[in-house]
Structure formats: C-alpha cells, structure tokens
Amino acid sequence: MIFGLTVLHTPGHASDHLCFARADGVLFSGDHVMSWNSSIVSPPDGNMRDYCAQFRRLIDRNDRVYLPGRGPAITDPRPYAERLLANRIRREAEILAHLSNTADSIWQIAASVYRKTDPHIAKAAESNVAAHLEKLLSEGRVARDGELWRGAE
C-alpha cells in the first residue's frame, strides 16, 4: 500500500502496467480499462493472455468506479469490463474461424476480422491480432509457419 492506495500489477496492455485501488472502491485503471475504447495489446511487451487474466481479476473485485487514464469515469465498471473481455473473446473466436479455412498473415487476418480502413486503426488491429495469435500459439490452438498462421491440427 502506497499513500492509501493498493498497487495492482496488471500486465497485458504493457508488461509494467499498474492499477491503483482505494479502499472506498475507486480504481485508477490507467490504460488497462479505458472508457472510450479498448486498449491496444501489442507484442512483445503487450500480452493478450495476461491482459485477459487481469480483466478477470478486475471483474472479480468489488470496485464501484474506474477512473481510466483516458476518457470519463466508468461508474458501473463490472458489466463494462465484462463487455470488453467478451469482445476480446469474440475477436479470438473470429480469428480461429478465419484460420480454420486458410493459413494467413497477420495483416490479412486483421483486414478480415476488423475490417478497418483508417490506416492507424488498421495498424492497431494488426497489433491486437498479433497478441491474440501469440496467446493462441501458447495454448497450442494455432501454429506459425514463417509469416503465415493456421489453426492447429
């Protein structure tokens, strides 16, 4: 505890990410949970497996409000965090479905799953796809052959 705050190491978005909790149910969520959008998880420093595990950890807490590093306060944080985690799980399922039909590059998977035309947002989508693929690889659910990824056999 530092100055009445409990420090929570919440790796995922970045390996050194921290959240800070007050005893009154206020959580300073930083970039782990933002109110305007989901965070980019960009390997090698970002790790989707850790990111999802820390989301589950925060969902299991009884915080009453999140104060993110970007965007307004989140006054009903549990359902909001549950929706963000569900979105990640849905994206993962879409990636697996894409790879069930073909081997493909990160760029092509991101283009198929995210369908973003803005180049900056498309680049963020590629980072998230890379993070999902690394997570799935660690779970033995996908395989990599050079630049191509495929579903595990």
Image: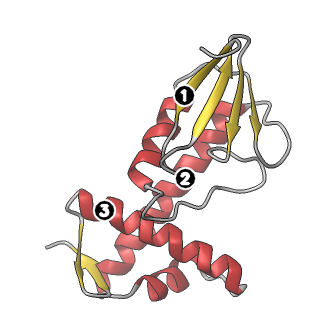
Q: Which residue is mark 1?
A: 8
Q: Residue at x 30, y 81 (%)?
A: 149
The residue wearing badge 3 is 136
Residue 24: horizontal and vertical position, in percent? 74, 11
Horizontally, is 50 left or right of 113 in the view?
Answer: left
Q: Position of residue 102 (x, y in %)?
A: 30, 88
Q: Secondary structure at mark 2?
A: loop
Residue in the image at 48% along x and 31% along y: 57
Q: Are marks 3 and 2 in contact (CB under 8 Å)?
A: no
The crowd level at tag 3 (other Cα within 10 Å; few <14, some 14-19, many 20+) is many
Q: Amino acid at mark 3?
A: Leu
Task: Write down the residue under mark 2.
Answer: 13
What kind of element bears circle 1?
strand
Quadrant location of the N terminus in the rendered image: top right
Residue 4 in the figure: left or right of residue 95: right
The span from disc 3 to disc 1 (Cα, nearest Å) is 25 Å
Q: Is residue 25 above or below residue 59?
A: above
Q: Quadrant of residue 122?
A: bottom right
